[in-house]
Amino acid sequence: MSNISYYTQEGLRKLKDELEFFERVERTRISNDIAEARDKGDLSENAEYHAAKEEQSMLELKIAKLKEVLSNARIVDESLLDTSKVLIHSTVKLKNTASKVEFKYTLVADSETNLKEGKLSVNSPIGKGLLGKKVGDIAEILAPSGMMEFEILEITRG
């Protein structure tokens, strides 16, 4: 089963840059660390060698996961997004009905999430709760602190 994820052109470029960095820079560095540690003698008691091999395993796992994400990545043409309801790459202005505080989030793929920039994962509890809602709707979202209600004030393209 594939997990198709939708990205902006910029988001996809960042993923590709990260993969290239891991494959070209980090792999080389770790290989050099392993070679240096191997040159120090007995591998059975060589902590540096075992640490470098563990780091290599973790890096290869990251590379494999990133390649899988990229193989299932699709670019969204934001100019074609429907602004009548909340979708991935929608920017949503909402109000907490209890506190009356207003927020603005853009729903993005997990790897593009950055709360400081107002980019919220479409797979987060709030993101999932907003999907498909229209202006004027109330989204009821179960958060760790309990049930929260948000009124959808505005929907625009990312």
Image (tube, rainbow, N blue to C red):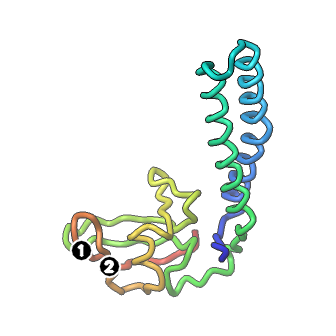
Residue 136: where, in percent of width, then height?
Answer: 36, 86
- Tell me if mark 2 has few (under 14), some (14-19) or many (20+) residues whose alpha carbon lies within 10 angstroms of its own: many
Can you identify the residue that label 1 sits on? Answer: 147
Task: Give the answer, above or below, for where 71 lies relative to 137.
Answer: above
Using the image, determine if residue 50 lies above or below residue 38: below
**Point 59% across, 21% down: residue:** 47
User: Which residue is denoted by mark 2 in the rendering?
Assistant: 151
Q: Quadrant of residue 67?
A: bottom right
Q: Which residue does the image show at 60% across and 19% down from the upper left? A: 45
- Structural distance between the alpha carbons of marks 1 and 2: 14 Å
| Three-letter residue code for mark 1 | Met
Report the side of 26 relative to 138 (left or right).
right
> Which one is nearer the viewer's eye here, 31 or 155?
31
Residue 81: x %, y % from top left: 63, 80
SS at badge 2: strand
User: Is residue 107 depicted above or below 116 in this figure?
Assistant: below
